[in-house]
Image: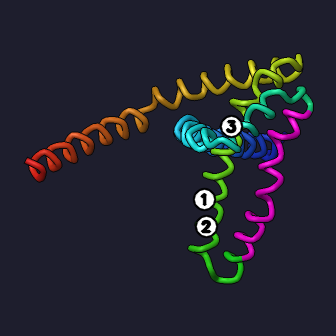
């Protein structure tokens, strides 16, 4: 009796794909973690302008479903920019296309971060959203704990601190 190697191969492939997916998701979450607060603060600073301050007051007053729609709007509006970037890449303008994708990601993250800050109280009034948000934050915290406990993370943090110390020493030597 021979055993079929395909089920084991499928299981191994599925595990590899799951690992790849979780790895990519971890990178995305780390980017969001890194960029979310600073970008949100930058837009909050811009939001101090009188006209934008009034718009932010109106956003805070939105009912839950309107707040959800507004929160999803930047993702929809950035689709044409991302498609344009893919067109640029396909037509030989790789650097420009990748730059457009990165810029769209940074701008989109900044806008969504600010909008989420403004709409979160309304969104949390929807029970399903509050449950999903609690589950998401718990899962994200566990993932970040695992990433931060990894050798790669600890080594990169040590390298970053060493570079920061070296830059501080150079600045001190130059500006004496």
Q: Is residue 53 magenta?
A: no
Judge the density around disc 3: few (<14), some (14-19), many (≥20) Cα neighbours within 10 Å: some
Which mark sits nearer the N-terminus, 2 or 3?
A: 3
- Which residue carries the number 3 mark? 53
The image quadrant of residue 32 is top right
Image height of 12 relative to 148, above or below: below
Camera-near label (3 vs 1) is 3
- Res. 161 in view: yes
Describe residue 9's horizontal placement relative to residue 158 as left or right.
Answer: right
Image height of 47 relative to 124, above or below: below
Highlighted range, magenta = 66-87
Describe residue 149's horizontal placement relative to residue 17 as left or right.
Answer: left
Pick the residue in front: 89 or 109: 109
Describe residue 6's horizontal placement relative to residue 107 as left or right.
Answer: right
Q: Secondary structure at mark 1?
A: helix
Colour convention of the picture: rainbow
| Residue at 81% over, 20% down | 124
Q: Secondary structure at mark 3?
A: helix
Q: Position of residue 130 (x, y in %)?
A: 81, 19
Tell me whether circle 2 and circle 1 mark residues in contact (CB < 8 Å).
yes
Q: Position of residue 131 (x, y in %)?
A: 82, 18
- Which residue carries the number 1 mark? 102
Pick the residue in front: 29 or 35: 35
Q: Main secondary structure of the magenta part?
A: helix
Judge the density around disc 1: few (<14), some (14-19), many (≥20) Cα neighbours within 10 Å: some
Figure disc tally: 3
Judge the density around disc 2: few (<14), some (14-19), many (≥20) Cα neighbours within 10 Å: some
């Amino acid at each position: 009796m021979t055993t079929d190697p395909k089920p084991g191969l499928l299981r191994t492939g599925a595990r590899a794909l799951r690992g790849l997916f979780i790895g990519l998701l971890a990178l995305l979450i780390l980017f969001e973690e890194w960029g979310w607060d600073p970008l949100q603060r930058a837009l909050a600073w811009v939001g101090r302008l009188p006209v934008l301050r009034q718009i932010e007051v109106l956003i805070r007053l939105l009912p839950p479903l309107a707040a959800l729609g507004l929160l999803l709007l930047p993702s929809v509006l950035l689709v044409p920019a991302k498609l344009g970037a893919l067109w640029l890449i396909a037509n030989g303008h790789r650097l420009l296309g990748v730059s457009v994708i990165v810029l769209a990601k940074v701008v989109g993250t900044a806008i969504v971060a600010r909008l989420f800050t403004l709409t979160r109280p309304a969104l949390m009034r929807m029970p399903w959203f509050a449950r999903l948000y609690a589950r998401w934050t718990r899962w994200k915290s566990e993932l970040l704990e695992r990433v931060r406990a990894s050798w790669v993370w600890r080594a990169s943090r040590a390298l970053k601190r060493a570079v920061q110390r070296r830059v501080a020493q150079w600045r001190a030597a130059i500006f004496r």
